Amino acid sequence: MTEKRGNIIRLRAIITGVLFAAIICLLTPFNNIYRQATLLGGGHFPLAPFCIFFVLSLAVMLIGNISRRPYILRGSELIIIWIQMAIGAGIAYTGFARTFLINLTAPVHFATIGNMWREKLLPLLPSQLMPREDAITMLYRGIDGGREMNWGEVILNIPWKAWLEPILLWGAFSLLSFGVMFCLVNILSRQWVHNEKINFPLLKVPEIIGTAVNERALDRLLLDRFLLAGLAVPLFLHLLNGLSFYFPSVPNISTFAAAGHYFPNYGLFSGFAKLKIYFYPAFIGFAFLTSRQISFSFWFFFFAGCLLYGVLNVIGIIIPASELGITFGPTLSRPEEMQMIGAYGVFFFFLLWLARHHLADVTRQSFFVGKPSSTRTEWFDVRLSFWGTIGGIAALVYWYVRLGTSPLTATLTVLAFFMITIVAARIICQGGIAYFTLTAAPLDGIIALFGTKLFAGVNGVLAGMSQKTFFVDLRESLMPSLVHGRKIHHGLHPGLLLFGGLVATVMLSLAASFGSMMALCYRFGMRELNQEWATRTTVTVYENIFRLVNNPTDTGSWVFNFAFAGALVMLLLVIAYHRFYWWPIHPIGYLTAYSSAMRILWLSFFIGWACNALCMRYGGIAFFRKATLFFVGLIIGDFLMGGGWAIVGIFTDIGYQVLPD
């Protein structure tokens, strides 16, 4: 009976999660962008949600132990609150708010005589997708006297009428995109969670804390000697470095080192000339919690990718970057990295092949040929998900076509968006990568396969603009968080309340993030905010769009060759992985070989893999379980120190950064 009661989620937990998510969304733009303080969000294990979750867990334990009454929130409910906050934190920053307004207004504000955007680009862009030019000017300059106004007065003085049509159109695009993600996760969850039983490393720490709360054993968990030893490492490290940041006379321990100068610029090891070493205790913890096969594959393929540059250099193959032509990948810089286009495509079809029986069953049910499953593990009927996915994709294609895109380009663009998003969600959720970036963008794959003619005129403008909105900056994308949410919801009831809580979180987070960002920009002026990354990446996108529609350059033959090579390597990897139980390499590692995330995290995965292997080999299962708490302590300590210094940053002009930006 106790177990069944623990599986029932009460309305109080859902409401608490929605409210905390909304608060995070309201505060994040001001904290992250204006104050430049420690990020409240960031990645798929964001700072503020975990700190709030941890403090709530402590408060629930203390109140329950003092009053000797049942806890006001169960452990399972605390985890529900955490995932809702994590979703909100992603939408509030890179997942949406950080670049959205710049993306909408850049073609007008950054148009100059030299770049000719006003003459060549703006006539192709549907006017209803952007506000009037005077509203854009005010967005970057700020409302006259806005700094002296309170937030309520600023909100009342925003020219909302000028934004009404863009909000409606982009709101429809956003809700349709998120709706398709919900449906896809509902379809894939049984395969990923139940059939394949994939590991979810990023959920381990919240689950361990939640289980301890359910068993009224959180105090024993936090006093465990292994966990305390793990806590001590980041506490000492960041206490010393934080004090040194504010008081330079205090010595510090560097967590960064440039190792590239140890390698030559030419020759076999030239690919390591820009090697950097970062030390993040939390990410070492995540790597330890990831399966050894995956953590090994991440750093192995990172080194293999660096070595490939040297091999090509030794044999005299030096390929100019101009061979890439026009690309949108956030970190794509060399033709060799186009291997990822082929690799992503093959891995996507590998995922479909693994799920072939499940997808066939879903299809039969959706056409009323097969019987529905007697035990439902999804949020709602998979038949609704099936038709919702098809209907949502069709509606998105219509959105593009209605604004002037050709049906073929619109269809390929939408399908590429969700194909890449599904693969990225699998990498993040199974690989435990809290900080993930794409190498190549979805449009790069279409251009490599079909050329640039598909993106002539308005086709290229709408595709590039919409891609920047949700489908290229995946550091805080929604779909991996939805997969995590589906895993957390497994075995909990009522399903409709849980699903409704996520929908409400997404809707309110979108509204709160957009409103907060609008108020911030119109009060201070966007040009006064430190938006260097968002501005630079957005302007680069429009420069590429301009080249695409004005003077398209076809990609070189090397791009296709490397894309084909990437597909072939991935095909061999998935065959070996699926056929040979002893095979030591996981295909997911190859997909991150050129990601900027792995340039930061390779050392963390190496240390986490080595510690995992050594503990299991020489300590046995009993010691491995105890040692796990040490690495859990690393994660908890790193994030608590990040939260502590974030609070300090509120009262100072600068903030000490614990986690990567």
Image (cartoon, helix red, strand yellow):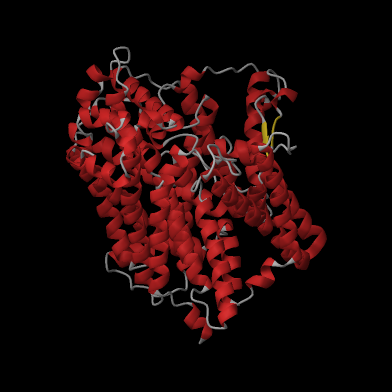
Q: Is residue 95 left or right of residue 549?
A: right
Horizontal relation, residue 198 to residue 524: left or right: right
142, 352: nearer the viewer: 142
Residue 627: x and y in percent read: 74, 61
Work out which residue is located at the far top of the displayed protein and give it: 114
Up the image or down, 148 lies above or below 635; here it is above
Quadrant of the rendered image containing residue 271: top right
Looking at the rendered image, the quarter that the C terminus falls into is top right
Residue 345 seen from this side: no
Q: Nearer the viewer, residue 482 or 420?
A: 482
Q: Nearer the viewer, residue 444 or 476?
A: 476
Q: Position of residue 521 (x, y in %)?
A: 34, 36
Q: How many badges with numbers are in the image?
A: 0
Residue 439 visible, this angle: yes
x, y (%) of residue 47? 53, 51
The residue that appears at 52% across and 77% down in the rendered structure is: 71
Looking at the image, residue 181 lies above or below residue 134? below
Res. 471 image quadrant: top left
Residue farthest right in this picture: 618
- Residue 440 in the image: above or below residue 629: above
Residue at 37% from the left image edge and 36% from the top image edge: 468
Estimate the x, y position of residue 454 in percent, counting from the top left.
29, 29
Residue at figure coordinates x 73%, y 34% from the top left: 249
Viewer-nearest residue: 621 or 495: 495
Q: Taking 329 as reference, is 571 left or right?
A: right
Q: Residue furthest front?
A: 148
